[in-house]
Amino acid sequence: MKKYLVLAVAIAALAACAAIRNPAPVAVYDFGLQPFPAQLSADDGPGNKQLRTSLLVAETIAPAWLDSTAIHYRLAYDDPTRFLAYRSSRWASTPAKLLTQRVRTRIAAINERGVMNPGEGTRADYILRLDLEEFAQVFDTPSRSSAIVQLRASLVDRATRYAVSQRSFGVELPAPTANAAGAVKALTEASDQLIESLIGWLEQELRDKGKEGFSEG
C-alpha cells in the first residue's frame, strides 16, 4: 500500500511540473476587422458624409486600472467595486490604444483632409481628445452580463488651445456569452457604436462652429 501511495504522489508531482512547464495558452484578442462606412446603416452614423476639417486624434487617456492588456469584468451581483480580470485571455494592446486606432481609422475613412497623429508635427484645425472612463464586462447574474464602454470627448481648437466642446458617451450591450470571448465581442460592438455617436457629435459641432466640417456624400 505504501508503494502505491508513493507512486501516486510521484505521478501527481510529475503532472504538476508538466503543467508548470506547459501552461495553458493565453487567448489574445483585438477589435477584429473594422466595418467599412458602406456597411454602416443610416441609423448607425454618418456613413454617407465626408469630413473636411483637419483633425489630430490624440492618444486616448485611461485611468491606471484600465491601462493594461487585461480583459476586465465586474460582478455587480456580488461586489461591483471589485475590478477582476480573466486569467487566460487578454487584449493585444491596452483598450485605450485599441480604441485610439479604431477612432483614427474610422475618421480617416471619411475625412478628405486626413487624420494626424501627435508625432507627425503637422498642423490641424482641431484636436480630438478622448478620456476612457469604463471598459469592462459587468455581470448582473453569473450567467448574464453586459459590456459597458464610457468615455469623455473634448474638441479643442488648435489655434487657441481652448476646448470648444465636450461630451460624455456611453454604450451598454448584452454579452452573448458569460466568458472572455463574449466580453470581447460585446466590447468591440459597443466601441463601434460609440464611435459612430462620436462622429455624429463631431459633425454637429464642426457645423455649428461654421467650419463646414461635413458635406453630404
Image (spheres, helix red, strand yellow):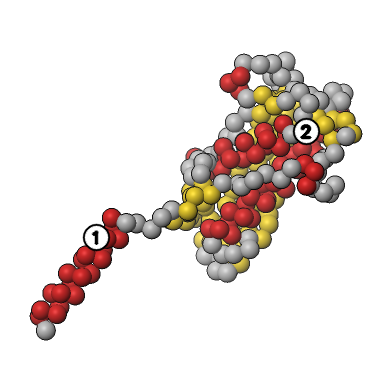
Residue ID at (83%, 27%): 213
Name the residue carrying label 2. 110
Q: Where the C terminus falls, by quadrant?
A: top right
* Front residue of this view, candidates 27 and 197: 27
Name the residue carrying label 1. 17
Whole-number angstrom distance, CA of label 2 to CA of label 1: 54 Å
> Where is 65 relative to 7, above or below?
above
Is 111 on the left-hand or right-hand side of 94?
A: right
* Front residue of this view, candidates 24 and 163: 24
Q: Residue furthest bottom?
A: 1
Is 108 on the left-hand or right-hand side of 4?
A: right
Residue 157 placement (x, y as % from top left): 73, 21
Residue type, numbered disc 2: Ile
Which mark is first along the chain, 1 or 2?
Answer: 1
Is 61 on the left-hand or right-hand side of 167?
A: left
Residue 149 seen in this snapshot? no
Corner quadrant of residue 74: bottom right
> Where is 185 relative to 56, above or below?
below
Residue 30 placement (x, y as % from top left): 56, 46
Residue ID at (71%, 45%): 35
* Front residue of this view, candidates 18 and 100: 18
Q: Residues within 10 Å of mark 2 (few under 14, many from 20)?
A: many
> Where is 44 relative to 114, above or below?
below
Residue type, numbered disc 1: Cys
Q: Secondary structure at mark 1?
A: helix
Residue 92 seen in this snapshot? yes
Corner quadrant of residue 195: top right
